[in-house]
Amino acid sequence: MENREERPAYEQVPTPPERGLLHIWQSAGPIEELSLGRVLLSRPVLQVTLGEHHGLLLTQGGQVYSFGELLWRDLSIPLSAPVLEESLLGKSVVRVAAGGFHCGALSEQGNVYMWGENTAGQCGQTEKGTVTNITVSEPCLVSVVDSEVVPPVVVRVMDLACGREHSLALSSQNELWAWGSGCQLGLVTNNFPVWRPQKVEHLAGRHVIQVACGAYHSLALVRSLLPQNNNTLRPPEKKERGQSPHSSVTEREESLTADDAHYCPLGVELSEVLIGETTPRRRGPRRRLHPVGRSAGSSPGSGSFPYSGDGKSSTAQKLPELDGHADHLTQTDGRPVSHPLPCWGANKNSAFPDEMELQNILQKLSGHSLETQPINGPGDTDSLSSHTSDDSCVSSTPSTDLLISSNSGVSGPYSSSPVCLEEVRLCLEAEKKGLQGQKSSSLTNIHQKGKTAGNRRCSLPGTPTHGSPRRRRPCPCKPSSASRTQAAASEDAGDGLPSLETEVWSWGRGSEGQLGHGDQLARLQPLCIKSLTGEEVIKVSAGSHHSLALSAQCTVYSWGSNMCGQLGHVNSPVTVPQQAKLSDGLRIWDVSAGQSHSLLLADGDCVQPILLYCGQHQESLSARRETSHQSQRSCQRSPSRAEIYSVRPTLLPLCMEMGYISSVSCGGQSCAVLADQNVMGFISAIHELASRERHFYCWLSNTRKLLLTPLRNREGACPTLGEPCTHLFFSLCESFVRLSILIGRHATSLSYFLHDVQGADVKSLPLLTHTDDFLVIYKEYCFALGNFHVMGGFQSLHKLSLEVLGSQQSLLARLCVPDQSVSGDTDLVSLLYWPLQQLHQYSRVLLKLGSCYDVLTEEYQCLHQGCRHYESLSLSLLRRKKEAETTFLFWKSHSGKNTEVLRLPQRRVVCESSNRSLTLQKAGRFSNHWFILFNDALVHTQNAIPSQNFFSTHHVYPLTCLWVKPVTEDTRGLYAIKITCPEESFTLVASTPQEKNKWLRSLNQAVDQVLGGGGQGSSPGVTAISRTATYTFTGEGSFKDAHYTGGWLAGRVHGRGTMKWPDGQTYTGNFKNGLEDGYGESVMPNKVLNKPDGYQGQWRDGKIQGFGKYKYASGQVYEGCFYEGQRQGYGMLSSGKQARTSSSVFIGQWVQDRKTGYGVYDDITRGEKYMGMWLDDQRNGQAVVVTQYGMYYEGTFKENKMIGPGLLVSDDDTAFHGEFADDWTVNGKGVLSLANGDCLEGLFGGEWSTGLKVVGTYTKPAADEPDNKERNSLFRLGQYLVPSAQRWGCVFTECWSRLGCAAAGRGERTIAWENIAVTITTAQRHSPNLSRSQSKALESLEFIPQQGEAVTTANFDNIRRYLIKACETPIHPLGWLVETLITVYRMTYVGVGSNRRLLRQAVQEVQAYLTHFFSLVRFLFPGLPDDGCIIPDPPASPSKSRHNSNTEGVVVVSCSSLLLPLLLPRLYPPLFTLYSLQEEPEEAQYWERIIRLNKQPDQSLLSFLGVQEKFWPVWMSILGEKKQIVSSSKDACFVSAVETLQQISTTFTPSDKLLVIQKTFEELTQEVKPMLEGNFLWCMDDLLPLFLYVVLRARIRNLGAEVSLIEDLMDPNVQHGEMGLMFTTLKACYIQIQHESTL
């Protein structure tokens, strides 16, 4: 922790006189005679913590020092020479804690180290096999392990607190862990001591900010839950609990005094275990007994109790050590109102054998009016005198905090009458004898008296009866620093500032009311103190038997024991939190509670803090002697009170000598403070900032409480203020509350900053880290205040304040700052504007802090920047205040009905032309024009009379859509200013050049400010030509009544925006020069169908033009190209899901919104697919029609009918060629060919499906008759088809247009590449949801290959890689082309189009794709040679084998080798299906022979195929073992070659399939070579039978389709090479297998 941050130049070397000064004194001494003890160490002290008689110091560098009575080491260390805890060196300790008689330290890593007394397990250390580990002399690690998770994890601790017999740790997850003994642990357990830290489950799921430990009670500061969570978390308790946890303090007090019998809250389990732990603890070092006095703050009848302790004190009188196992208490007060129930600890020699006898005894005891309260067991009580020298206890066994008695009939805040020490001793002995040999136990039942007994508590107070909150709310896990306690509070709001929504929870013993629940019951589990909820508590502190809570409003709440006035008040009851009595003007910002005193740190009249003290202190020496002499002769029942105490906090004069105090600490009877000296004004500046902020927050809280809240809650506020002002006032109150919350959190954060000012970094000041929050909230408050001011709200508010406050107007005087009085509404204005002055104070203090650093340091730069921010904001808000005042006066002087319509809360007047300084150009001679410039609009009134606030008409021009330009070239000498608006333009003429400049500057400043600029208007005439604004059109035109939000350019819509019309039409997209242009999305209502049309796509000049998708209200969807709002070019129209009568899809060419050109129409309802030409939405021209029943027709269409010559082929190969008159209707000459070869020629008539009438000649060909070539030509397929080169020209035309070309090849190459770059960039900018792979693909396409250079093999590879990426990206024009071609191909040949007679057409269409595509590629890369040409290979670059060139050193470029790998894999499924259908008869014959031949063993098959025996394998390898091939072996020969050939079905392109064939031959050669000697060359006679065997064993299902596909689409350059020969061999094998008889 040493040198954790870079410090200012003046403190690079820490010097003790400047920082971390420690002052300690005894609180019990006379205030006039206090002597300070000062510790001088080589390092500054970061923290001091005090126990009963010892203390710990933490210095810079993480070193820990101890002083005082170190009983665990039998040492007494003077304060002047503290001893270093050497075992903690190197542990980086960041926090220390001192308990009653044990110590704790916390490292930077979150590790806990404990040492000291361990009788109750408070050190968390134990030795196995021993019970004597009652002290831990050296710091030992205590592991805090969360065993609820799997695997268990070590918990990182960020804060530590210690009591007398317990310890608490706050984890970095803001969860609480406890160990030790007693109900103050808050654990659900009955085994004590708790040696290992356990989680306090009742606070699990809650965000604990800070913890504090008293002697036998605990406090926790917890962040509040949301209101709805509170209701769920802690619902109202049942009636049997006696009261609701939300009941008021008064109700709780009444319920407690209603009866005299209450439940013993600790129970049986706790007491039994505690007694079991008594013996080892009684052997501990604390065996002395000191004077006891009456119980502080306990209820009457509870009595006073002696205690044992071991502390050493100069004021304590040593008494003889008491013998015995337990110290008994006897109460002799005979008042009949006191009937407390007895509570006992268990005894090992119990005479009660079972529970029934115990119940009987308890009933008898509760039935008698016993006034004696015996306590068996080692007795130590919690209700001991708080003003004695030592208040420690030996054990945590049940004590008098378990005894609850009635307060009826008793007055005064104090409880019992005094009992002298001798009587106490005699009573204890008598009780010991009377109960000797008897068994005692804690109460397990209650005998209630009267009817009110049924409403008493029936469960342990404080125990969770509704389940753990953890089940309802997840535990917040926020990391925080362990360097100080307030780290948790600094982050509990999630933004780095402490939250003010806090609660205080308490548990443990409560006999003195130190738990704050309005009673004196103990609590086994944490319970929220409801009276402190909403009080903005920021710190809690626990003394021995009292508790303190500090609020953000600098008030202190105290409760518990008040015997010595340590609560700072005399209010009753002391069992609930009460405010300490402080003088006016004192603001407390740090508190600490000791044994019987409290120390408060407050802001005084100056910057330097002051100390306040309340509690025990001694009288002068002479008075003390006289009191002591009188007490020895007295028969009082309590020890003599030699001390006096102050009830009201008293100023300690010596605090001014200590310097700037940063924190206070109390423990035992000691007080300690840490202070700093003011060096270069740094410390004083920090204290000044914090003091001012605390004062500011107190003022805000008082204003809110005394003024705003009563006014807002007034029932008649609305009629008084009026409806507009009422809403504005509520908005003002809300912004005031937000400002108040921010200031409160900031003030709290500054207090925390001061506690750790030595280790804190000045750059972490909230003013610097949360600058944006301050700027936003201050602006919001000033805006709300100005709006209320402008609308005249303060006049009505003043009247309302007179009605609400009435005679309490003096309360308002408390809120007024100096030099103000409460006499009018202007005072309210000044009062509520006063918070704006705080911004200047921020700037001033930051400037003062910056002067402490060198100008080159980071701290100076950060402070200087913050200073500029706040000073700029201060000046800006002061200008807004002046604008609001000016506007208010303007409306006040121009009040009237006409001007009232222009009066808006947010509107401010800038200037106006009532003095005729500005007029309209070419205005009429008798016309009057009045121009008023507001901060949001320019108002032009006609026929105006400003003096009478009258005008006939007016027009408002919003400044957001107003452009100002000075007219400089006016030869007429006019001082003109041109104003441009979205729907009109006009010119203003000024009377003088000065007036022109004034208006020009004002207009530019107003426009600049309304657009979010600085409003300086430094560049007149050029202010925001391009901007984003909102406007509603009113004039005639396409935008009439439309509301627009988006970009503008010089008065016209330009850029991206949204246009909405009143009829529901909307457009969202790009605009250009006032019209829709670019990509946009539009919704257009269809009044006929009562459903909207939708369009997404390109626009140009206000019309739909380009590629887009249109969804019609009828359900049809069109996706394609548009031109001037009409479908034009390529497009696909589908009927949609809503079509009921028919379902169809058309894809093809459109002209002027009609189907014209080539297209495919799929009539899904009829099961027909039309592929041909269209004209005006009708089928017209050459076409092909296929049906789902296998019918095939090709011919001519006219007017949507089959008219003219055509060819019709049925599924059974029956064919007809002749004249058609209608769809599927024959009429005229024709020839009918039957499947068996018979022919019928003549005149035909009738519909094909119903029957034909024939007049003609029937011909049956002879067996030896040759084929009739003329007749065969009539039935040749493809004679009426649309040529493949003429299909889908619209698709390629669209691609050319996307490249910027008017037609194919007509355009500039540079423009084409520019269009590609724009397309990619636009996609990256407007597509934020792109995946990572898509983004990388677009980035890779930004690098364009060198298209102008000569193509080499290296360039060719770059081009090929670029084309692959481009075709994989649909955004790229080539990628779009590929996607579209795949779409049209599948639409054509999938479904009904899967007709085997379409195979030739499909193959030709693929080849046409390649030709068109290659022309596009050559346009982009002109260096590529023509199809089939070669590229010389550079000498250093090897030839590319994948291009299969026969010439070494060259690469052959062809469209098939370059582009087929890009297209064919995605076209393969429909194409291969057609091949399979075409080859189906041959495939069936082939497959039947494959099945039959594969039944033979290998050797038999090789012999059958004629393979020479020298090629027969002899051995085969199975899992690495060689086995001989026998005659019965099957599938054992040439396995690798067979497996390689089988891969042909997994490839798509012919080139890849040829590579598979080549690898098969290579594998076959590798397997044959070992059988032969020398060089071996294949001959076809040897190769064909062997390869035939491989083909048979490969069992390729559709080999015929594979062979046909390769043959049709193979690169012509490889047909006659080595691969061509191998393919011929495969084809020969396929044919040979078909004709098995020749084998």
Image: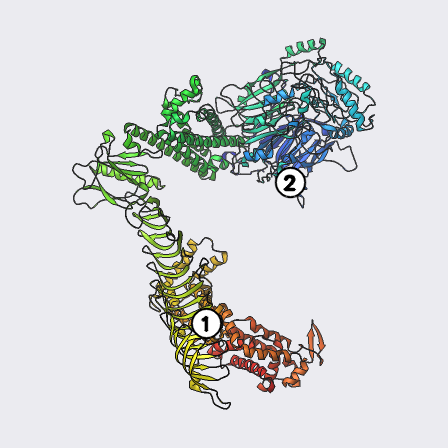
Task: Provide residue 1532's location: percent of width, then percent of height.
Answer: 67, 77
- For badge 1, the amino acid type reads Val
Residue that numbered label 1 is attached to: 1186
Residue that numbered label 2 is attached to: 155
Task: Provide residue 444's location: percent of width, then percent of height.
Answer: 74, 27
Residue 1015 in sight = yes
Q: How is the image coloured?
A: rainbow
- 1605 or 1212, which lies in front? 1212
Quarter occupied by residue 2: top right
830 to the left or right of 467? left
Q: CA distance from mark 1 to mark 2?
A: 77 Å
- Choose mark 1 or mark 2, whichever is in front: 1
Task: Provide residue 1053's location: percent of width, then percent of height.
Answer: 32, 49
Quarter occupied by residue 116: top right
- 414 or 931, which lies in front? 931
Q: Are marks 1 and 2 in contact (CB under 8 Å)?
A: no
Where, quadrant-wise, is the C terminus in this rendering? bottom right
**Looking at the picture, does residue 584 appear above or below residue 1497?**
above
- Mark 2: give few (<14), some (14-19) or many (20+) Cα within 10 Å: some
**Looking at the picture, does residue 1629 appear above or below residue 1038?**
below
**For the point 39% across and 33% down, which residue is it?**
783
Where, quadrant-wise, is the N terminus in this rendering? top right
Q: Secondary structure at mark 1?
A: strand
The single residue placed furthest to the bottom in the displayed view is 1264
Q: Earlier in the sequence, mark 1 or mark 2?
A: 2
Q: Secondary structure at mark 2?
A: loop
Quarter occupied by residue 616: top right
120 to the left or right of 819? right
- 139 or 1335, which lies in front? 1335
- For badge 2, the amino acid type reads Val
Residue 226 in sight = no
- Mark 1: give few (<14), some (14-19) or many (20+) Cα within 10 Å: many
